[in-house]
Image (cartoon, rainbow, N blue to C red):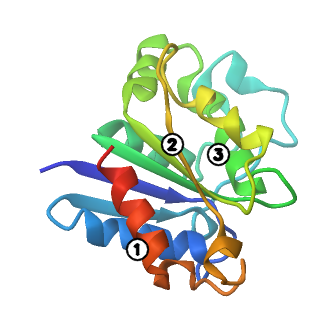
């Protein structure tokens, strides 16, 4: 049985990213699947500090939030999915907070960072068009030389609004997701 972590970075828990996460859980029904809706987690962005984490990871003034437990969960996973919405051609603020706070987890521990990078990851982007900001995103979360799996799911293609959360009702979207997990 695989241990699968699904992170969705939407600020809304009723949108397409949450629906995709639930659909992935159904597709992996025989595995241990945990969904992490980042909007429900306490993740403080980097702010108001003197970059203490650069000297000692534990010195981060925000170390008591959920970032450390989230990165630990990914390290325990056999596979992680990152589901991101396109907000004005960029990932949402939740992604940037998660990404920048990696310093307070990995700083000074190359073995831990390499273990994280080695966890297989798949990226699902809810976007009506590919954008360079998303194409480069996996490089921060996968080992060098790895070709990350990336899927764009465009809500407009399925005649659904980007904000009503019904994209996964479309059979074509379900089939694309099914094929993506079996690649």
Q: Residues within 10 Å of mark 2 (few under 14, many from 20)?
A: some
At 11% from the left edge and 50% from the top edge, which residue is drawn? 1
The residue nearer to you, when weighing 170 against 136, is: 170
Q: Where is residue 182 in the image (x, y as percent from the top left)?
A: 29, 49
Disc 3 target residue: 98
Query: Mark 1 or mark 3, which is nearer the start of the sequence?
Result: 1
Query: Mark 1 or mark 2, which is nearer the start of the sequence?
Result: 1
86 left or right of 143 in image: right
Disc 2 target residue: 68
Front position among marks 3 and 1: 1
Asked if marks 3 and 1 touch (Cβ < 8 Å), the reply is: no
The residue nearer to you, when weighing 41 against 151, is: 151
Q: Where is residue 59 in the image (x, y as percent from the top left)?
A: 65, 29
Element class at badge 1: helix
Q: Distance from label 2 to label 1 (Cα)?
A: 24 Å
Number of on-image labels = 3
Query: Mark 2 or mark 3, which is nearer the start of the sequence?
Result: 2
Numbered circle sitting on residue 22: 1
Q: Distance from label 3 to label 2 (Cα)?
A: 10 Å
Asked if marks 2 and 1 touch (Cβ < 8 Å), the reply is: no
The residue nearer to you, when weighing 62 against 137, is: 137
């Amino acid at each position: 049985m695989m241990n699968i972590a699904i992170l969705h970075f939407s600020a809304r828990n009723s949108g397409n990213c949450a629906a995709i996460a639930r659909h992935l859980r159904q597709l992996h029904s025989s595995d241990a699947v945990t969904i992490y809706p980042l909007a429900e987690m306490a993740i403080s962005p980097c702010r108001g500090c003197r970059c203490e984490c650069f000297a000692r990871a534990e010195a981060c003034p925000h170390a008591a939030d959920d970032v450390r437990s989230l990165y630990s969960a990914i390290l325990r996973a056999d596979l992680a999915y990152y589901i991101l919405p396109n907000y004005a051609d960029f990932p949402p603020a939740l992604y940037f907070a998660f990404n920048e706070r990696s310093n307070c987890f990995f700083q000074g521990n190359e073995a831990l960072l390499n273990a994280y990078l080695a966890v297989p990851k798949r990226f699902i982007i809810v976007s009506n068009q590919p954008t360079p900001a998303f194409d480069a995103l996996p490089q921060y979360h996968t080992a060098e030389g790895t070709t990350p799996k990336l899927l764009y799911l465009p809500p407009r293609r399925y005649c659904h609004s980007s904000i009503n959360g019904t994209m996964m009702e479309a059979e074509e979207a379900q089939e694309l997701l099914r094929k993506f997990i079996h690649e």
